[in-house]
Amino acid sequence: MEDLTLKQLESLAIGYFECRLSRAEEEDLRKVLLLSPLRSGLLDECRLAMGLEATVRRGRRPRRASSTMRWLSVAATAALLICATTFLMRDTTGGIDSPQPTFYAEVYIHGRKVADQQTAARIAEQGRRKSLARMDSLLHASLDRRDRQLKELRRLSATTAD
Amino acid sequence: MLLIAVAATVTALAANPRLACESLFSEKYRSNPQATVSIINSTGNYFRGISVANDPSLVKEIEKKLEEDRKLATNTVEEYSAGNKYDIVLNIPLGGKIISVGYTRNGDGSAELFVSGPPEAFR
């Protein structure tokens, strides 16, 4: 009985659970399961049912990871922690570019900061409107020029076609 | 696991492309006696402006930074006028938004530059 294959042992285990084995056959199966290195879910269930918990526990002992794998795991965990810390710290820098409540302005004229916040806000806002108005004017002028040139081009094409 | 950690680190460190022009609003230029610098932070708008009077070397410095940022622009409108006058507007994608950089050179050693856009673009 010691030379049975895994399939044969499983077959006997099924027979055990279905109470088809004789007492002698059960005893033989018990001895084989005690000593056999063969394992499967069914055979371990059978071992447990036969009171052979120790052999099941012995078989389930986890393999020790090699030291290389252990070091790789430590390195990966450290890298992940560094990455998470870096990501979290990106948004915590302070300074003038941190979001200010509602509206905040600073103006420096000839190297000197305008001390009064309201005056600074007024000057900064005037400068902003002037800049954006100039930008709008430039963009509109450019679009107008483009439209005029397209019209002229169409006129010339029509004249040539005639 | 290690590969994932490395990839995540690279992604986290990969910041928005920073504008070269933003350095024009640092302490170095705020304390420049030839410059006027305006800074606005509001919930709806991020605005920075610098204007320079009678300083051709500072104007050159500004134009050098502008040329760097021009490479990032998806849309450019520029105009040359008599008397060495020059205007340009750049639209640059930044942080998933579009921001504007506008520049005017007045041809007499004076110039103005601004950067404007939604605050989320600059975080």
Image: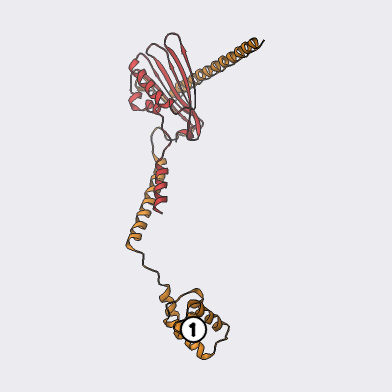
Chain colours: A orange, B red
- Rendered residue at 42%/18% (across/down): B112
Q: Is label 1 in a helix, a strand or a loop?
A: loop
- Identify whether A65 is placed above or below A21: above
Question: Callout 1, which amino acid?
Answer: Met
Instruction: Compare residues B120 and A160 and report the one nearer the observer.
Output: A160
Res B54 → quadrant: top left
Dot 1, crowdedness within 10 Å: few (<14), some or many (≥20)? some
- Rendered residue at 34%/63% (across/down): A66
Instruction: Compare residues B70 and A102 and report the one nearer the observer.
Output: B70
Residue of label 1: A50
Give residue A134's position: percent from left, percent from top: 50, 17
- Rendered residue at 58%/13% (across/down): A149
- Identify whether B68 is placed above or below A142: below
Residue A103 in sight here: no
Question: Which chain letter matches label 1?
Answer: A
The C terminus of chain B: image quadrant: top left
The N terminus of chain B: image quadrant: bottom left
Res B107 → quadrant: top left
Give residue B59's position: percent from left, percent from top: 37, 18
Residue B57 in sight here: yes
How many numbered callouts? 1
- Identify whether B108 is placed above or below A136: above
Give residue A103's position: percent from left, percent from top: 48, 30
Give residue A51's position: percent from left, percent from top: 47, 83
